[in-house]
Image (cartoon, helix red, strand yellow):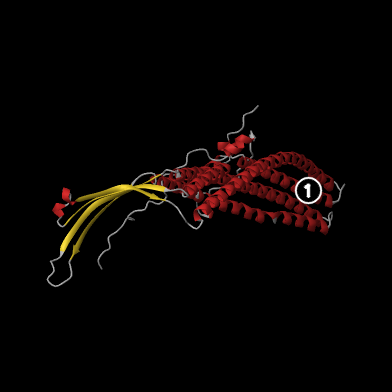
Amino acid sequence: MKPPTDLGHWWKTFHDPVLDRLIDEAVAGNLDVSAAAARIREARATRLVAVGGLFPVVYGDASAIETKLPGKGAAPPAWLFRAGFDASWELDLFGGQRRAVEAATRGVEAADAGLRATLLTLIGDVNTNYIEMRGAEARISLASQTAASQRQTAGLTKSMFEAGSSSELDLANATALAASTEAVVPQLEQSRALSIHRLGILLGREPGALLARLRRGAPLPQPHDRLRPGLPADLLSRRPDIAMAERQLAQATARIGVADAALYPSVSLTGSIATSASRIGDLGKGFTIGWSWGPSLTVPIFAGGQLVAAVDVAGAQRDETRLALQSLVLTAMEEVENSLVLLSQERIRMHQLGKSAGSYRQADQLSKKLWQAGAVAFLSVLDAERSLYSAEDALIQSRILISIDAIALAKALGGGWDDPVDVDHPLVLDANTGPHLVEAQ
């Protein structure tokens, strides 16, 4: 059995180096990817904040206060200097802080999966718009060639009309058919331009950035290898949106523990040490140093039902994420099955359209010969030309659909970008953003 195509680089089955370069540039420049990378940095920083709650907090303070007693003949003003440290540490007896760290960790994992989901969507969109652009070019080429052939037929009809061997009706029909075919080209040019504009945006650039670069003449890409769905477990492990939903479920479950821990007492260890004196030189001497330390207990007695309700809220949110995950799994399975059916049936359709186009091509050639010999009416020539163009255009559209269905199958199977993506470096490096002393006016 032939092994399945690498889903990490599935678009290479099209064997189109231009498409490969566009995808590389899109991964590097797409704005949605950059936003997803920023969300990963945010989630990592949020986790560090949660981890910090497991450790003691120490603050330092210093003061210099001038005092003067009221009254007539009172003592002169005196200074009081003080310096010290205050520390506190909340013991995580009931696991609230640990569950908060767990929730933050699952948030990081969900953000990682979110980046992969964004990449999957991006690569699918680049492929789809590129296929639609090349498909529009193929249809433009066919319409132009067909219109040129129909113009030749109209020219021959005109010569025969001038010679008296053809009617004015035949000339009008031939001219109208050529003009009708030519009228298709502007609409296809619009589709081509819109696809190029969309590709520019997907690459993080202006809409017209690729107009000069994406020249005409390249063939319509077709998948050369078939993707295999594999086992359902493979689907669940590859789909980044499912992975993100599963991590969000784990995060919501951990938040229940955070809310539940708030129902129980909290114990903290607090302490302080300070030195105070009326002269700076006395600071730090034994007789100026004072300290205190000891545990403190906080017991929730009455909070109007808020703490219990918070647990219920977290539980309901957990149920919501669980149902969302189940729905997403079913949808993913449906997308795979639908893509397989669409792709297989479109291949059958394309095969039949190919035979139809070949037969119409023979009919077109034969009708022209018989018409020139006077054996059939000119209407047979027009019908043959019209039918041939419709069959060949339908064949091109079927080839486009096969490529698009292959893209949809790759996305449904979770095919995306498996290479590393830089998420550690922000796009903007802020400078001179720290605290500033207020300048005198």
Please provide percent x and percent y for residue 54.
39, 44
User: Compared with residue 179, is residue 234 higher up or lower down, i.e. above or below?
Assistant: above
Report the residue that reaches farthest toward the front: 301
Drawn side of residue 406 relative to residue 363, left or right: left
Element at label 1: helix
- Name the outermost residue toward the right: 375
328 vs 303, left or right, is right
Name the residue located 58 percent from the left edge and 34 percent from the top edge: 6
Type of the residue with mark 1: Ser
In the current view of this chain or complex, which residue is farthest to the bottom?
A: 72
* Residue on which the image places disc 1: 387
Place of residue 245 in the rendered image (x, y in percent of width and height, measured from the top left) = 56, 45
Indicate the quadrant containing the C terminus: top left, top right, bottom left or bottom right: bottom left
- Can residue 211 be seen here? The reply is no
Taking depth in this image into account, of 302 and 201 the one nearest to the observer is 302
- Observer-nearest of 192 and 46: 46
